[in-house]
Image (cartoon, grey):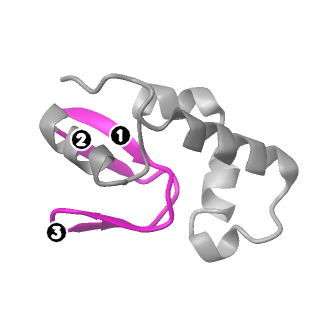
Amino acid sequence: MRKFRFVGTTAEIGDRRLTRLGEEVVLSAEDARQALDGGVALLPEAMFNSVGFTEQELSIYAWPGQRIDTPEAFEAKLRKAHALIGKEEVSE
């Protein structure tokens, strides 16, 4: 099992609904691969941490509706996070 962080707007993995930027989810390698193949925007925790979101940003911009007219620095981090999706082999 491995920790991942959500970087999308909304998604479902099994019976769990992900709606918050940075939301943590623990998945097996198989479940993570299936989620990524299904278009769920997930990053392994270490990769998510490397993007550099601050706790304040994760609080202020947690929900999709709060991400309107955000500062360019935050937008750059979000673009970087999205570019990293699926770039690392998922394993246990």
When asked about the image quadrant of residue 68, the answer is bottom right
Instruction: Say whether marks 1 and 2 touch (CB < 8 Å).
Output: yes
Q: Residue 61 vs residue 47: left or right?
A: right
Q: Position of residue 64 (x, y in %)?
A: 59, 70
Q: Which residue is mark 1?
A: 4
- In the image, 78 versus 56, the foreground residue is 78
Residue 71 place in picture, x, y as percent: 85, 55
Range of the magenta residues?
1-27
Select label 3 or label 2 by which is in front: 2
Q: Mark 3 falls on what kind of element?
A: loop
Q: Residue at x 70, y 67 (%)?
A: 67
Dot 2 lies on which element?
helix
For the residue carrying disc 1, how many other residues have a C-alpha within 10 Å: few (<14), some (14-19), or many (20+)?
many
Which amino acid type is shown beneath numbered disc 2?
Answer: Ala
- Location of residue 9 with respect to 29 vertically, above or below: below
Q: Residue at label 2?
A: 32
Image x and y of residue 14, in percent: 16, 63
Give the x, y percent position of residue 52.
66, 33
Q: In the rendered view, does 13 fall on the left or right side of 70?
A: left
For mark 1, give the secondary structure: strand
Q: Which residue is pictured at 86% across the width and 50% down the height?
A: 72
Q: First in sequence: mark 3 or mark 1?
A: 1
Q: Identify which residue, 41 or 71, lies in the foreground.
A: 41
Q: Is residue 15 shown in magenta? A: yes
Q: 30 above or below 72?
A: above
Q: Tell me which amino acid carries mark 3.
A: Asp
**Dot 3 alpha-carbon crowd within 10 angstroms: few under 14, some 14 to 19, many 20 or more:** few
Residue at the disc numbered 3: 15
User: What residue appears at the point 36 percent right and 54 percent down from the top-left corner?
Assistant: 40
Precedes in sequence: disc 3 or disc 2:
3
How far, Cα to Cα, is label 3 from label 1? 17 Å
